[in-house]
Amino acid sequence: MGRKEDMVELVESLMEKKENIRNIGTVAHIDHGKTTLSDSLIAAAGLINNELSGEVQLMDYEDQEQDRGITINAANISLAYPWEGKQHLINLIDTPGHVDFTGEVIRAMRAVDGVILVVDAVEGVMPQTETVIRQSLKEYVKPVLFINKVDRIISELNATEQQMQEKFIKVITHVNTLIERNAPQQFKEEWKVGIEKGTVAFGSAMKKWGVSAPYIKKSGVTFKQVYEYMKNNQQDELAKKSPVHEAVLQMVIDHLPSPLQSQKYRIKKIWAGDEESEIGKNMVSCNANGPLSMVITDVGVDQHAGDVATGRIYSGTIQPGDEVLLATTNQKIKIQKLGIYMSGDFLTIKKASAGNITAIVGAKDIYAGETVSTTEMKSFENFMSNAKPVMTISIEAKNPKDLPKLIEVLKKLSKEDPNLQATINQETGEHLLSGMGELHLEVNIYRIKNNHKLEVETSSPIVVYHEAIKNGSELLEAKSPNKHNKFKIKTTKIAGELFEKLLDANMEGKIKPKHTESIDKLKGIGFDTDTARKIWAVIGTNVLVDRTRGIVALNEIRELLVQAFTDAMNEGPLAKEKCQGVMFELMDATLHEDSIHRGPAQVLPAITRGIYACMLQGGVELFEPKQLLTVSVPENQMGSASRELGARRVQITEMKTEGDSSIIIGKAPVKELIGFSNAMRSATQGRAVWTAEYHGYEKLPNELQQPTIKEIRKRKGMPEEVKSWQYFID
């Protein structure tokens, strides 16, 4: 029996001991050392040779990850550790640090209770560090801090012991500011990290050493000695006396919560049901003997097993042969296999219980975010994110006979990665693939060509814009094609704090009549009570409000009104781009008494065209996606980097100097970042290093509005000129 099989037996035996379980993730900015640190933890559990840790990069199991030197997939592994006379089960998820794979981090946060935030000692807190700490705190996930690559302070900056400590204080202060701003109210102070608290460790994951205040008492190695070991290039000796995995594991076990602790406060954040109900009480208490409740956080498609869905169990126990219910589709499925992941390997287990992360096989169509249970229950909340695809390419099979295979592959990829969206342009019939950026799309094209052996041709990347209204409209009347149905309608602009809260709420879809939980949520966002009760649907940041009174047959066409509103919000009047910040209000309606005369062919075009008329009358403009760009260059390349940024409409917000490097921070339009990598390398002789973070949508400059609208309409095969608002209701 191999090491992994031995580990599986041990892991299974520990799944029942809830107080000794830690579900954790490693999160960080790209290249700050998460995967290298994970290697040390895996080596400590005996799955890889300690000498090879840091080089193996076990959690980067896809060949692209090894080739590119970055983490693309959130990878799970379950490990058993003896600590102070007790065996502990650590379910570890190593997450990506690149902005294009933010979705992987967001989904992983639903499965874990704590994170190790890894920060490069020299680079400090970077944009993606801020993003991942916000994401974890939104999910009520507690952080501890590991300051990595401390040896760089000596080897590159030649810092004194005092300067090294100042670097640590700067990082800790920055992290605590983020915790203060984003942590749950009751944990703002308690979750702040500190050296004396034991919630900060520092070291070098690559050199395999690490220390913390509590671990110093155990190892006897002082802060002063740590500095001397580095100064004298004796880090191998330091690693023997103070191994990184021991300092980090002590911090994780002592300061990150077990499922028994975390579920007491996390359930109310991630589940909007009644905590006093049977299922609610069982989840809060992490009861393994209650009904099953599980949320799926990741889906892989195996060519032999089909969908393999990984998720967190919040109550109950699951084993092969069990019949469970999928909340979204209301379908019942039988669990064929149950397993845990050891990096890329799926290893079967006999059962898994509350508080654990496990993978199930048995569902034909299952998606991340799905609620799995043995009794009917309210679904878990949507993942806490507003990151949306901002770049699109068209894709076609080189050989026409491969079209069915391409459709199947695109479906599989978008199932594995919900931030990847595959659609068909109804006018041209071309397949479109939308993602979070150039790298995200590149990675998936590589998978199509290499993993699925499918030859495809792709277009240059296209940016996804949004359409928004400048002002509200007057009250207009929209008529159905047969003129028997009339709708008095208007649009109002949603802006400011209400728009931001709607964006953060990630509340999507139609709302059931008199649905108390939805009404309460809408009131929490900022809608007044009367409006909240009358909202029929939320599509992105757009809402449909019924302000009519006493129209008998209106409920019979409710679904059609929601569908027409959805269609209009997904394809706006300017260039068929998604809309944002539109409140569509139905004020009055006159409906034909015979239902045959108020069917889809009459209602859908009347409402869709009516919405277009209202929006165009108030004025519509394009919004473009932006990314926050942080560029680090040697001082002598500063001019070249600034010129390249200036040519790409980058709005510089901050410039600072660290050591002999200049750091430029600015907001960059995603469109201008197409081809940016090669251009910046060329401009700075390959000396620039940069990172980007999704920064939402902002208005496209006035002088670019008309040219961009014409360009998009031409690409989509639409007439060049936008019709007047009167055209849509005459």
Image (spheres, rainbow, N blue to C red):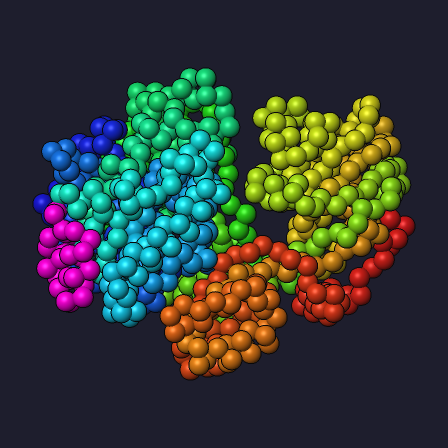
Whether residue 297 is visible, yes or no, is no
Which image quadrant is residue 709 in? bottom right
Which image quadrant is residue 466 in? bottom right
- Residue at figure coordinates x 14%, y 51% from the top left: 221
25 left or right, relative to 679: left
Whether residue 24 is visible, yes or no, is yes
Judge by depth and name the residue closer to the eye, 100 or 640.
640
Give x and y (percent) for residue 468. 71, 53
- Residue at figure coordinates x 17%, y 46% from the top left: 216
Question: Which stretch appears magenta?
Answer: 219-244
Give x and y (percent) for residue 652. 57, 67
- Residue at figure coordinates x 32%, y 48% from the top left: 145
Give x and y (percent) for residue 422. 53, 55
120 left or right, relative to 42: right
- Residue at figure coordinates x 34%, y 43% from the top left: 193
Judge by depth and name the residue closer to the eye, 579 or 202.
202
